[in-house]
Amino acid sequence: MFTTKEVASYYDTTLIHYRQWWGLKKNLSLHYGLWTKGISSFSEALANTNKVLLSHTNIDSKSKVLDAGCGVGGAAIYIHQKTQASITGLTLSKKQIEFAMAAAQEKNIVDAVNFLEMDFTYTTFPSETFDVVWACESICNAINKAAFIQEAYRLLKPGGQLIMCDFYKKSQQQKDRKAYMKKWGDTWGVPQFETVQFFKSEMLNKGFNRIKTFDHTSDIKKSAKKLYRAALLGALPSMLYNVTHPKVSYFAKNHYKCGYYQYKALQENLWEYQIITGYK
């Protein structure tokens, strides 16, 4: 079980890895890309994740959006460029904030997007501040996922929408003979994985309605395989680096393994990738 400080350390430590593996400077994305019909490149797939998520919302120029777990700001920038909405992004990582602010300044939109170091499960915003709470592959890192659902409900205006996409374990009772899911989480700063049903139940309990799910597991398989290949290519250099730098941090030492474990777990049908939406 990780602490919020350790989750922050994961993202601070591995930012350099995402620069190399995921083309971070160009793509501004740490998430899986969705390879739907007509997508022909990895960069297109990454942008398509934001496009598909946005298609499930009614965000417009008057909307106030909270990006819970904003990463390096790519989604916030995308949403604003497409809708002119006002976006506030939250992350635990100081380095991600610096990266996101630099990207916003480069695109001359610093007045429309704001990035703060804050735990999205316990924020300082007044109740009913936002029209949409957006979370892309970030709630997996929450220590208390039920607390996030409760906080999202508090922060949303009446009629407001929660939309999140993430990787979810298939069932609470599944047999993971080689502990791929735990090993994946341990190398990716994920305290524990939960099921889609867990989130649907929590949303219902907190008062959300019109809850819908959209399964995109088949659309992320190319991205999962790309991450797997990166892990294989990076294994030897990483092991050699670990030998010559024995005091390197846990995540720096083990991060390359996450690509291997997530793909093996996917092959074992232990997780799925879905979008979940609901309204207050």
Image (cartoon, rainbow, N blue to C red):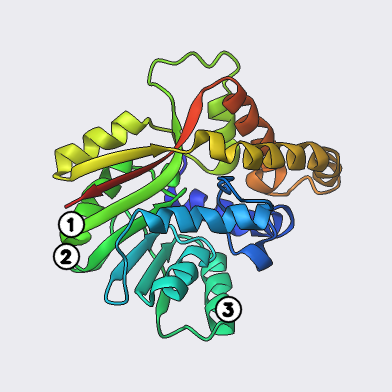
Dot 2 or dot 1: first in sequence order is 2
Q: Name the residue under label 2.
A: 128
Disc 2 crowd rating (10 Å Cα; few below 14, some 14-19, many 20+) is some
Question: Mark 3 and mark 2: span between their CA atoms?
Answer: 29 Å
Numbered tag placed on residue 220 in the rendering: none
Res. 76 image quadrant? bottom left
Image vertical order of residue 149 relative to residue 114, above or below: above
Image coords of residue 188 (percent x, y): 57, 42
Q: Name the residue under label 3.
A: 102
Check contact, mark 2 vs mark 1: CB within 8 A. yes
Q: How many labels does the image show?
A: 3
Image coords of residue 224 (percent x, y): 63, 38
Dot 3 or dot 1: first in sequence order is 3
Q: Which of 15 and 197 is in front in this view?
A: 197
Dot 3 or dot 2: first in sequence order is 3
- In percent of the image, x 51 and y 34: which residue is there? 217
Q: Name the residue under label 1.
A: 154
Question: Mark 2 and mark 1: span between their CA atoms?
Answer: 6 Å
The type of residue carrying mark 3 is: Ala
Image vertical order of residue 177 relative to residue 123, above or below: above
Disc 3 crowd rating (10 Å Cα; few below 14, some 14-19, many 20+) is some
Image coords of residue 269 (percent x, y): 53, 22
